[in-house]
Image: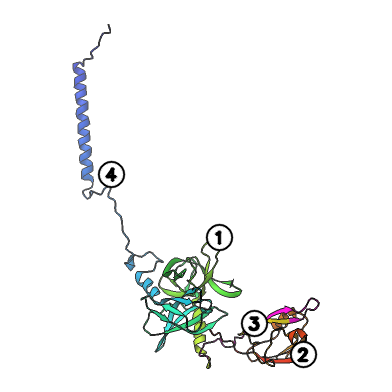
Amino acid sequence: MKQQINKRFNEKEIIFLSLAIFFALLFTVTCVYFFNQKDDTSSSDSTNNFNVTIDTVTYEDEASIPTGYPSTETREKAFSSSVMIEIPLTSSTYYGSGSIFMEDEEYTYILTCHHVIEVASANNIYITLYDGTTTRATFVGADTSSDVAILKFEGTGYQKITSISSNSDLSSGQSVFAVGYSLGLYDFTYNFGSLSQSKERTITIDGLTLTALQIDAAINGGMSGGGVFDANGNFIGMIVGGYDSQDAQNVNFILPAYDVIQTAITLLSNMDASTGVGYIPGQYNLGLTIGTFGAQSTYPIVMEIPQESTFYGTDKSTSLQLYDILKSVKIGNGAVHDLSTYNDVISIFNSEEVEVGTEIVFVVAENYGIDDIERTVTITVKQYIFTL
């Protein structure tokens, strides 16, 4: 049978155990008192007896806004100076954006891109203001070479943009924001970003070469013509386009404000008496599509003449006609050049001085030369005026 062994403490062990318990309790009480007295300002939100302070930044308070972020007032001014553009077409609606930049006694004037309104007719451009008002806008003028256009609408007293004067006011990496009609679905969209490079870029969009500034703020379809502003709300440029590619991440471009404003002033300072439309003095259009006649011949032949071309017209003595074979040309006081290929035409026009008022004389063979009829065509280069 297993014997049970009872452990009993002797007197010395009891005294030692009692002292150990006493000192343990004393140490605990002392520690609690010390930490409670260490910081009388601790609150119920304290963690491990250290106060936790969370500063809340209210961006409505302009003094608290981090550098580069526009204030509420700045954003509202940008929105109020912006317009959304709609152009109803037969089977769809074309969308764009613009910025209010000046007014006279009767009208308010809007900056936008030429490519935004080029599909419009004279009576189907509508704008929506930031207060929700929708009204019809009138075409004022456009410079197709710089993609700048001007519209106007009746009424005055609206918020206008404040523009920078030169690129010396810009620096790489500075904060910018864009306002526009994103996808034609979301009006007065605000997109924030930075100026990727204050150095101007030379870009080509749909065959048109432009001088532009690069930004990384997100730009979507329908935002073309919209304003881009710095953190102080100054107009620094107008959205013109960007890369639409899986390889591109917000590589977008704006026309510099100083160029856009100067073009607008030129348009408004030169109004055609017959159309009431603004134009750029000295601008002309020699647009022409030339092909090659026959399998055995290389003679240049007129295949298409745009109506805006200085060569377009119905009078055979003062305009080219479809299927005219170009045999020779004389530009101004220059020599007569025989033409054998369409490359000859390009080379000669690139080398000769051409300006508004220059006289150009062609000798042509009509109707592919089938009827064996030649004629002399005398054309005077005319001022180009874009009209809807």
Distance between mark 3 and mark 4 Cα atoms: 80 Å
Sequence-first disc among 4 and 2: 4
Horizontally, is 245 left or right of 136 in the view? right
On the question of residue 198 being in view, the answer is no
Horizontally, is 61 left or right of 162 in the view? left
Specify the principal SS of the magenta part. loop
On the question of residue 319 being in view, the answer is yes
**Looking at the image, which is closer to me, 16 or 374?**
374
Q: Do the residues labelled 2 and 1 touch (CB within 8 Å)?
A: no
Distance between mark 2 and mark 3 Cα atoms: 25 Å
Residue at the spot x=21%, y=15% of the render? Answer: 8
Q: Quadrant of the N terminus?
A: top left
Q: What's under tag 4, amino acid-wise?
A: Asn
Q: Is mark 1 on a helix, strand or loop?
A: loop
Q: Which residue carries the number 3 mark?
A: 287
Q: Are marks 4 and 2 in contact (CB under 8 Å)?
A: no
- As for residue 288 lying within the magenta part, the answer is yes
Q: What element carries label 2?
A: loop
Q: Which residue carries the number 1 mark?
A: 246
Horizontally, is 47 left or right of 134 in the view? left
On residue 373, the disc is 2
Q: Do the residues labelled 3 and 4 touch (CB within 8 Å)?
A: no
Q: Is mark 3 on a helix, strand or loop?
A: loop
Q: What's under tag 3, amino acid-wise?
A: Gly
What segment is highlighted magenta in the picture?
275-300
Distance between mark 4 and mark 2 Cα atoms: 104 Å
Q: Which residue carries the number 4 mark?
A: 48
